[in-house]
Amino acid sequence: MEINLKEYIMMIKKRLWIVVLFVLASTMLTAFYSTVNYQPVYMAATKLIVNKTSEKDMTGKEQIDYAAIGVNIALINTYKEIIKTPAIMDKVVQRYPDLNLSAEQLIAMTNVSDLHETQVMTIVAQSGSYEKAVKIANAVSDVFQTEIPKIMKVDNVTILNRAKMQDNPVPINKKSNQYIVLSFAASLVISIGIIFLLEALDDTVKTEDDVREMFGASTLALIPKLKDKEINAGKRSKSRRKVGEVAHAKTIQ
């Protein structure tokens, strides 16, 4: 069967309102849903250093203990795991009841990372409120610094910088138009498919080819379908001719 692209275009053009209505409705609903259900997520971070790396020599001066640096770097992996345990998070819940969070929630909202081959690690907190993210990050850092000497019997953690409030914090999950674009494309394809389906189900006779295919006979004549504009134009033309004839008759008299 030969594909006539022009016929397909005419099908779509004839029912273009279906495409426009379907695409607009789908895209607007998707945009509304995305806007209503968008929840910004903010991030705040503190940096800590594991820095017990000096010892006193024979003269009483402090010098860097390079062996201790390697030990401290190795300890960071242990500290990362300790931070995300009830041993720390339960203390945060007790000392900061204003957070209104459980230890399990704090663990889920907190992440700990380290800078490769350094003694620095970062405590990151995420929340729907930037103010709350700042409080969580600072609270976990404070509790960890005070509790780690009791757990590890070593005092080698110092807070480098605390999380600070910002005037205009930017969420880490910016609003995306991806779903709107996908909705537009999907609704466009579906609406065109509906048009082709309606055309396939329509068994009315429209063209000479339809007559020839259904009755096996050729057409002798065609009666064109007049548009309203053409009918009104014909009536006006006929009316003008009548008025002209009457005026001519009066002139002869």
Image: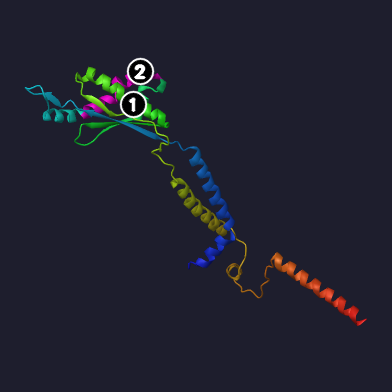
Residue found at x 26% / y 24%:
82
Under circle 2, the secondary element is helix
Residue type, label 1: Asn
Q: In this view, does 62 lie to the left or right of 232?
A: left
- Percent across and percent down for residue 55 are 12, 24
Residue type beneath disc 2: Arg
Of all residues shown, which one is farthest toward the bottom?
252
Say whether residue 100 is visible. no
How many numbered badges does the structure rendering display?
2
**Residue at position x 14%, y 27% in the image:** 68
Q: In this view, does 177 lie to the left or right of 122?
A: right
N-term-proximal mark, 2 vs 1: 2
Compared with residue 23, is residue 135 higher up or lower down, i.e. above or below? Answer: above
Residue 93 in picture, x, y percent from top left: 36, 20
Depicted 242 relative to depicted 52: above or below: below
What is the C-alpha distance between the residues marked 2 and 1? 12 Å
Task: State which region is magenta.
Answer: 76-97
Per the image, label 1 sits on a secondary structure element best described as helix
The foreground one among 233 and 149 is: 149
Crowd tier of the residue under label 2, counting other residues whose Cα lies within 10 Å: few below 14, some 14–19, many 20 or above: few
Camera-near label (2 vs 1) is 1
Image quadrant where residue 251 sits: bottom right
From the viewer's perspective, is residue 223 above or below residue 45? below
For the residue pair 221 and 236, the one nearer the viewer reads as 236
Q: Nearer the viewer, residue 9 or 142?
A: 142
Which of the 4 image quadrants contains residue 72? top left
Q: Mark 2 points at which residue?
A: 95
**What residue is drawn where x is 52% and y is 48%?**
27
Q: Mark 1 points at which residue?
A: 138
Residue 17 lies within the magenta run = no
37 sits left or right of 56 in the view = right
